[in-house]
Image (cartoon, helix red, strand yellow):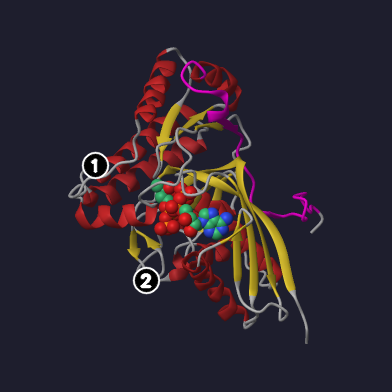
Amino acid sequence: MNHQYHSIYRAHTNIALIKYWGKRDQELYLPMTSSLSLTLESLYTDTKVLFSPNLKNDTFTLNYQKQSQEETKKIIRFVDLFRKESGIHLPVSIESINHVPTAAGLASSASAFAALSAAINDALQLNFSSEKLSTFSRQGSGSSTRSLFGGLAMWHRGYGHHSDSSYAEEIDSADWDIGMLIVVINSQQKKISSRIGMQHTIESSPFYELWPREVEQDLDQMLQAIKQRDIDAMGRIAEHNAMKMHATMLAANPSFNYFEPKTLVAINKVQQMRDQGLSCYYTMDAGPNVKILCPFSQIEQIKKILMEDFNEDQLIISLPGRAPYSIDSLGQPLETR
Ligand code: ADP
Ligand code: DP6
């Protein structure tokens, strides 16, 4: 039989309001803590997969460039999880385009593995629920679990070494007045990946032992704040949670950090805008870029003030994004599927 399997999917990135920082099981990518994020409309990845007997070997292109053997091996190890599950062992061609800077702390790995998982699920007709799919995508990149959902999503820590217990789900559709403004301070590839950074922190930071308890408390409060749609409480909790995560890195040995001078300019500006009565709060990941949580209705005003210090092309505004969806080769959604 000469059957081919193909699909194209778009998945949006997400930015954590309660961060994931550390694995308790490095084989299964089980996290030390649960985490929670907002999916973003403006930043996404499109991924096309084709499984075919006519292909000679597995190939992977990212932004039209053939990837190194090492990168390809990493991704094929991931595809193998699905091959094993489906019993379809055909060679695969993967073509991915990031509409988000790669490896710059803007969560390209989240949209990347969510798009790839969703495309494979569709191509191989696995019909996994998004929750089940998240237990696979987790093994490509932890943060991608949350990008399988729109709005506000939570990735559960789970228990023991049970892969199925650590899945993500949507907790709020975020179809109310909420948005995010991203200040792109540097979109170059960072020197220390999240994966390496979190592991080094676990191994050497005396502050890390405080982290799981802090996350648990922050998460409880965050869920309450979301229920009440209290964006100020959400912002305060997210800001504190992010800075506690960065504190664990500062205390690592050797210490490392993702701050650049302009990161502090953005953070100080957010504090000033808040003093002026705007509802805006910052968060930051494994990169120098600053993400500002605010009501979408205030985002243009906030952007205007930030333009005193940043160029317009450094400021990306976003509404909450939706769950992954299939697209045609021109990038148009296939709503009917
Ligand atoms: P980021 O902050 O961008 O998520 P990470 O260091 O966490 O940075 O992840 C970046 C890595 O994710 C890349 O080095 C690459 O291995 C992988 N990645 C990024 N985009 C894609 C993609 N579209 N398809 C497959 N893998 C990708
Ligand atoms: C700081 O999901 O990129 O953005 O699971 O090793 O691929 P791996 O790590 P990744 O880490 C994300 C870390 C973070 C916080 C977050 O998104 O929760």
Disc 2 versus disc 1: nearer the observer: 1
* Mark 2 crowdedness (10 Å alpha carbons): few <14, some 14-19, many ≥20: some
For the point 52% across and 19% down, which residue is it?
307
For the point 36% across and 54% down, which residue is it?
33
Which quarter of the rendering shows the C terminus? Answer: bottom right
For the point 75% across and 76% down, which residue is it?
4
- Residue 251 visible in the current orientation: yes
Q: Position of residue 5 (x, y in %)?
A: 73, 73
The three-letter code of the residue at mark 2 reads His
Dominant secondary structure of the residues highlighted in magenta in the image? loop
First in sequence: mark 2 vs mark 1 = 2
Q: Position of residue 96 (x, y in %)?
A: 63, 57
User: How many numbered markers are drawn?
Assistant: 2
Q: Is residue 334 above or below residue 60?
A: above
In front here: 229 or 51? 51
Asked if the residue at label 2 sits under 8 Å from ligand 2, the reply is no
Q: Which residues are magenta?
A: 307-335
Determine which residue is flagged by label 1: 250
Kindly identify which numbered label has been placed on residue 161. Answer: 2
Q: Position of residue 66 (x, y in %)?
A: 59, 62
* The stretch drawn in magenta includes residue 323: yes
Q: CA distance from mark 2 to mark 1?
A: 29 Å
In front here: 191 or 173? 191
